[in-house]
Image: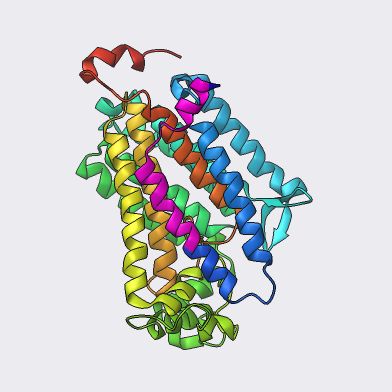
Amino acid sequence: MKNILKKAFDIDWILFCATLPLLGAGLVTMNSFTGDSQFFIRQIIWIFISITIFFGLSTIDFRFLRKTWVSVALFLVSCVLLGGLFVVGKVSHGAVSWFNLGLFSFQPADIIKLVIIIVLAKYFSRRHIEIANIRHILVSGFYACVIFFLVLIQPDFGSAVIIFLIWLGMVLVSGISKKHLLGMAFIGLIFFVSLWVFVFRDYQKDRIKSFINPMTDIHGTGYNAYQSSIAVGSGQLWGKGVGYGTQSRLKFLPEYQSDFIFSAFAEEWGFVGVVLLFLMYGIVIWRIILIALHGATNLEMLFGTGMAIFLIVHFFINVGMNMQLLPVTGQTLPFLSYGGSHLVTEFAGLGILMGMRRNARVTHKDSTKDEFIGV
């Protein structure tokens, strides 16, 4: 018992404590505008569950993730889960993205983002020297592409984009030649055109069109982005005060507890509050990168890097769509937005990182080279 408690408290407290103001900001914001406190109470429950998972996972030795069969099994289970959505999944906002488990719903795309980080970290950890070989880009791309398409056809375009960006970010970190990078950009352009013609639904095309020219339909597809940008701007320097954000309180701002919680927060707390919020996110990312740099092997380093990419991508996409800089994709703001699936995923990822942190290198990398060999 004493050993378990020692492990539980051997974590990066700066990282953990930096998440608490973010969780608190989300709770205060969503509680400011609800007639009843259903979002507030449910979010407290999810925060408790997520933090429990964080401390639980931080006690585990994750060196077993270096085994090839583990990453293969995780990948196959992910495919089965995503495929199962089309059989027993719950339709929400026109997408089959949720499993209805009675007391709560579960969105597998969130946790599968964590799985793809593990799979790619395992793959690149043994091939980082050979990454210039196009074969490894294609093979890793295959893993990501399978998950990408299973998420895209739900359809969940936002999560699919994040999965692609996680893969792209980890490829770039692992090392890629400029020639291959240009080739990927050209392929990506062709791929996007194909998606536009054959895959995107009308409402997805409308969101992109309204992003390019939001004033064309501010009462229709551009309404959400338009109202969110008004909310952000109206906060000015010091904000309107907690509970006095008119865009949210008067229901002009949709989904203010989840997709557009940044706009609701900015309206209440203003520019000063937003700067402090960004500072907390900066501390979280800084600590993750610091832990990654001291990873015991390339697997730990790449997993930490993947977690940083995961949070950065979510952050920029959510803030971007709230400020009318990116299309509305329905992605949450880490630690702040309402919802259990994304909170559990974020804290599970950080918990795994804490477990890996205990195996941080104390000697030169060459002394641990044997750890890269095995199945």
Viewed as shown, does residue 25 lie left or right of 282?
right
In x, y percent, where is residue 190?
40, 56
- Using the image, determine if residue 243 lies above or below residue 103: below
Outermost residue on the right side: it is 102
Q: Residue at x 44, y 64 (%)?
A: 318
Q: Nearer the viewer, residue 245 or 135?
A: 245
In magenta, the rendered stretch is 2-24
Residue 40 visible, this orientation: yes
Instruction: From the top left corner, tell me how far across and down residue 194 is, in percent.
Output: 47, 58
Count the labels in the image: 0
Residue 256, compared with residue 25, is above or below; it is below
Q: Is residue 116 magenta?
A: no
* Picture quadrant where residue 262 is located: bottom left
| Towards the viewer: 261 or 7 | 7
- Residue at 35 percent of width and 57 percent of height: 280
Q: Residue at x 56, y 30 (%)?
A: 74
Left or right: where 18 falls relative to 68: left
Depth check: 372 or 146 in front? 372
Q: Position of residue 124 (x, y in %)?
A: 35, 30
